[in-house]
Amino acid sequence: MTNNQGLDVVFQTLADPTRRAILARLARGPATVTDLAAPSGLALPTVLQHLRKLEEAGLIETTKQGRTRTCALRAGALAPARSWMEEQRLLWEGRHDRLDDYLASLTDTPKESPS
Amino acid sequence: MTNNQGLDVVFQTLADPTRRAILARLARGPATVTDLAAPSGLALPTVLQHLRKLEEAGLIETTKQGRTRTCALRAGALAPARSWMEEQRLLWEGRHDRLDDYLASLTDTPKESPS
DNA sequence: GCAATACTTAGTAATATGACTAACAATCAG
DNA sequence: CTGATTGTTAGTCATATTACTAAGTATTGC
């Protein structure tokens, strides 16, 4: 269905460059909170907020062991979003109504232009 | 690059269900502002705001002819977002570090010293 | 011309977002 | 135990988002 409620959350989560950077970093392997914060130039609590959102969106998972929390990607989490986009692409490309074509079709009244 | 600034806008735009619904509607063909507002149950100005965002994100284009504005999809506008997701998918799947595997690798030091 | 139609602008309000600092809690190293 | 490391919580603040209403402009049809 086009009404996937989880899509809101996933797209919203991906909309932030800091979070995309975190995902990109995690794509190279698991990391701790401090590891993730370092290149961002952000304060730890800020990064933590982003991590919470990423986790709530199901994009990552984390566990705490001792005093360090390790974060890793959750494979397949992007599938619904990818799926939606693919669906759209097919629809969009399937019918290539460009706007001007459409407008042309409206004035296409076979009447041989009086006046 | 992972730093695509346009991705912010596109993902942000897709994060709203009303806007996704508008896109889904437009995938079936161009429509006027009023057409798009009707099924949403929203006030016209609200829909207009969404349309402006969609247009700023490059996802649709609109033209006014007489007193009606017609909206249509802009094909290919999703490409950068799709591209980012595809890139991520490859990375994520390429290395299937699940979190527990990683943690296991850390404690690989056989701790024969429980209790 | 006049009224209905279709959109627009402006202003408002509730809520969400993303950043910070300060202070706390829980480990680990020596 | 003590202190450094790592994370967490709480509270604040500026800005953005998304909705609304009310009032405007521009076209079209009679």
Image (cartoon, coloured by chain):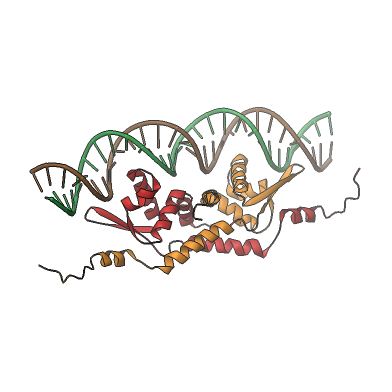
Chain colours: A orange, B red, C brown, D green
Please tell me how many numbered marks the rendered image carries.
0
Q: In this view, does B74 lie to the left or right of A49?
A: left
Q: Is residue D25 left or right of residue A13?
A: left
Foreground pick, B95 / B22:
B22
Q: In this view, does A19 lie to the left or right of A93?
A: right
Foreground pick, A45 / B92:
B92
Position in image of residue D9 (x %, y %) = 65, 33
Q: Residue at x 33, y 57 (%)?
A: B31
Figure quadrant of residue C23 = top right
Position in image of residue A21 (x %, y %) = 57, 53
Foreground pick, A16 / D23:
D23
Let me know if residue B52 appears in the view. Answer: no
Position in image of residue A11 (x %, y %) = 52, 52
Position in image of residue C2 (x %, y %) = 11, 42
Q: Residue at x 68, y 63 (%)?
A: B95
Q: In this view, does B91 lie above or below A43?
A: below
Let me know if residue A110 appears in the view. Answer: yes
Q: In which quarter of the image is the C terminus of chain A?
A: bottom left
Q: Residue at x 50, y 60 (%)?
A: A85
Q: Which residue is drawn at 64% across and 51% down?
A: A60
